[in-house]
Image (tube, coloured by chain):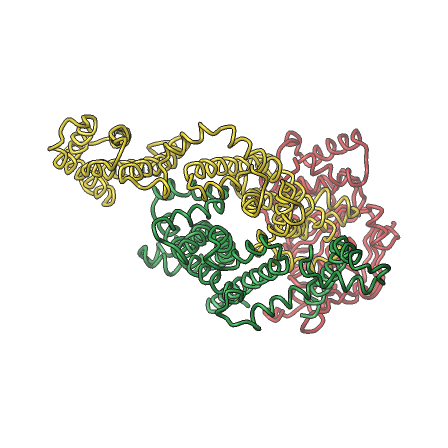
Chain colours: A green, B red, C yellow
Amino acid sequence: MANRVIPVLTILLAILAFWYAAAIWMNAPWQDRLNARADLIDVPFAEFAAQTWAQDKPVLPAPHQVVSEIWNATVALEITSRRSLAYHGWITLSATLLGFAFGTALGVALAVAIIHNDASDRSLMPWIIASQTIPILAIAPMVVVGLGSVGLTGLVPKALISMYLSFFPVVVGMVKGLRSPEAIQLDLLRTYDANGWQVFWKLRWPAAMPFLFASMKVGIAISLIGAVVAELSNASGGGLGVRLLTGSYNGQTVQIWAALFIAAGLAAILVAIVGSAEKWVNMRMGARA
Amino acid sequence: MTSVVSAQNLGLTFPTGDGDIVALSDVNLTINKGDFVSFIGPSGCGKTTFLRTIADLEKPTSGTLSVNGMSPEEARKARAYGYVFQAAALYPWRTIEKNIALPLEIMGHSAAKQAERVKRTMELVNLSGFEKKYPWQLSGGMQQRASIARALSFDADLLLMDEPFGALDEIVRDHLNSELLKLWARTEKTICFVTHSIPEAVYLSTRIVVMSPRPGRVTDIIESTLPRDRPLDIRETPEFLAIAARVREGLRAGHSYEEGSV
Amino acid sequence: MNRTGLTAMQFALALLAGGAALLGLAFGFTSFGSAPQLTVFFALGAASLLRLALPFSLWLDGALMLFGAVALILALPEEGAMPAHFWWALVASWAFAWLFVERLSAAIRAGHLPETGTGLVIPVIFGLALLVAWEVITRGANVPPVLLPPPSAIWARMTAEVPTLWADFVQTFVKSVLPGYAIGCLAGLAVAIAVDRSPFLKAGVMPIGNFMSALPIIGIAPIMVMWFGFDWQSKAAVVVAMTFFPMLVNTVAGLNAASAIERDLMHTYAANNWQTLMKLRLPAAGPFIFNALKINSTLALIGAIVAEFFGTPIVGMGFRISTGVGRLAIDLVWAEIAVAAIAGSAFYGVIALIERGVTFWHPSVRGGRT
């Protein structure tokens, strides 16, 4: 355990140190002008560094500024406040989860259709693969506005973007997974005269589990990205994407970084949840933990 | 006679989570120039470990080992031996001739010398005509021949072979065995050969080292009385069968077949 | 199977196709002559029900599908919704298309038709059927263009706006995506090779790299716009950040892909680290590196386009999309998306082609055993 944690911690500390140093360097020009305006000359370096780490709208906020902004915008605020990051985080999270659930269900259903029907395999698969090369995310604003024009606003358009993004990896992974049993294993079930239903539930589905979870990890991460990007095009709706956008309009860098960290934290938690579900299922299926 | 490999009281212990595993214990052995020595024994007896120790792929934990009068590491750096693994381990992105040229490239030989050596060793293993093929286009037996050619290409005097034909079917194996004998006669190399097939060991070797597990050790060394020139049907002669019986005896005496407790 | 030689599903589709055509003929009887070609299609489609008694080639299904689609599109009114019985034509030609594809893939499976060529026809038919349905539904049901413009309108816009689209493409793809992609991938590769020598660094960098790969890195776009300005530099910076981690993680994994035997082999030659890297580990990492290159090709385009939502000079694909959405010029947005789709697939395709050339030896490329 220790020899896995120590290297990671070392690198993290190095990043942190680099970050603080970069904050001094990047915020110095503005601080120089501030100090010149206030007739402060020959500020000792330690004091100057502290100044660069405490600017109001820094070019690069120091890590502790971001952390305190996160604290102020989550724990210290009413959860219903429009300025609460917990509120905005919840909006993004609910769209992500809804879209992910739709996307996974659709992906699994399509994969089942594809492996059982030659024609749908031949007609759908090339398009599904080709569509992965297309920057789907670019249509997010249009979908949001288009659905908005027919009265669909709020959660659903965002969830649709998330669904659209997350169903691709699930289809591709599940088709691979459901096809992963080897010919010998299928032949074995044939010798038992198993029907299609039994082959599916006793062989294909369990064999596809590792693939499903691997794709779900990718899917949940891009679901979140989809929700955040979808929020960019509807500034009134709220969500972490909106915080990024308003922060960028107002030059509130600390707010941007805080929203970014919350999004990163959400992604990490979501992937970790899928990861532990994967471990649990693997254990239930008798794999060695 | 000069000794190529010489081990005195050689021991090697692998520390693991639940106790040490004694892979080699008190091995004393001298291999002379021109010998064909087979190592035989059940899995876990340390025959592969011993070969890897000669090749400096494992470090002994006690005793001394010299290869060509040097330490194994010096011998490796002097490119004193060619090693043939259980799998052909040819690089799939290189053609057969480029695979055989690989050690020559690493050792910094000129292009002309590389071409000459590759041509010669490919003839030696009867692979001429397959220069431009990729490994996956060849059968398993041909792949293993290419890997032998690769080990021979830089003309080391010692050839270490770790169950090179273990994954091949018996017909191919017989064929390659007789070819290996011819190759050995022509090149006068010293060969150390790990196997778990008794007929293979008896057919090929001038000496057969019988080993047994827990701890890995040498239990018997049998000198072959067969002539150096051995047609395949020598395996039906009483002399051959007598040696095979001795090897089988040695294997049986060495350990009590307490299988399962690895 | 029954005596028509069709499976249950094909039989149902055949009934649906013929039945829909029959209904179209019946409901369209009052407006006879307004769209003669459609009437002909309905009549022929209804006649296909004769397959219950006579043999009916799958090519006839294909011909009916094609004829139905063309007739329907030609019959679409310029203004307003189409007459109700036209919908039966859509149902019928969709069913013919499906039936044709079903029978075609059954024929390929049975070995009656070659895989090459005919195998390609099926996805093309699916794509075209989708386009036809899109065109017919948007125009036939009079869907507001703001919601979804018909493909013909998008195509018209694309051909009319070539200079704008080209300028956007140059700004976004040539100036932002390509440099950012090159820098990000090279940096990821270089760091991976540097880190690879030290197990300690590798143990520290890998979890962080994996973690970063899952994060919405695209969110740094507003920060990059502040740091590097509105022009392409900030977009390229976003692309660098997005492409770096997948390349790092994949390359480190790839450098470990060489088997123990292969590495022992290099050891027995007393090869130095550089030789082992160049002759063994980097070639063995090839498939992993190309995997990252392919993932990154898509990420790079997304990154550049989304970063443009946060501020650009007045050119660029993301700029055009966000302002087009604001001005409700949805057909221009779709035209831009079509360009992005073509650029994205072409970019991916080029890398996939290079991959086939470079990692020709890998089982996934040569499609055989290991």
Position of residue B87 relative to residue A5, above or below, is: above
Q: Is residue B137 in sight in this rendering?
A: no
Examine the rendering and report whether any part of residue C172 can be seen.
Answer: yes
Closer to the camera in the image, C264 or A229: A229
Q: Position of residue A257 (x, y in %)?
A: 62, 59
Kindly identify the residue that appears in the image at 18 percent across and 26 percent down. C36
Q: Quadrant of the C terminus of chain B?
A: bottom right
Task: Give the image location of residue C149, x and y in percent.
Answer: 36, 38
- Name the image quarter holding residue B230: top right
Q: Along the line of sight, which residue is nearer the eye, C69 or A69?
A: A69
Q: Position of residue B156 (x, y in %)?
A: 80, 43
How many marks the image carries: the answer is 0
- Please identify the quarter of the rendering in which residue B72 is found: bottom right
* Residue at horizontal 79 percent and vertical 63 percent from the top: B27
Q: Toward the viewer: A289 or B165?
A: A289
Q: Is residue A168 placed above or below A257 in the rendered structure? A: above
Residue at the spot 67% in from the left edge and 65% down from the top edge = A65
Give percent across and percent down for residue C165.
51, 32
Q: Is residue C232 left or right of residue C157?
A: right
Q: Is residue C89 left or right of residue C104?
A: left
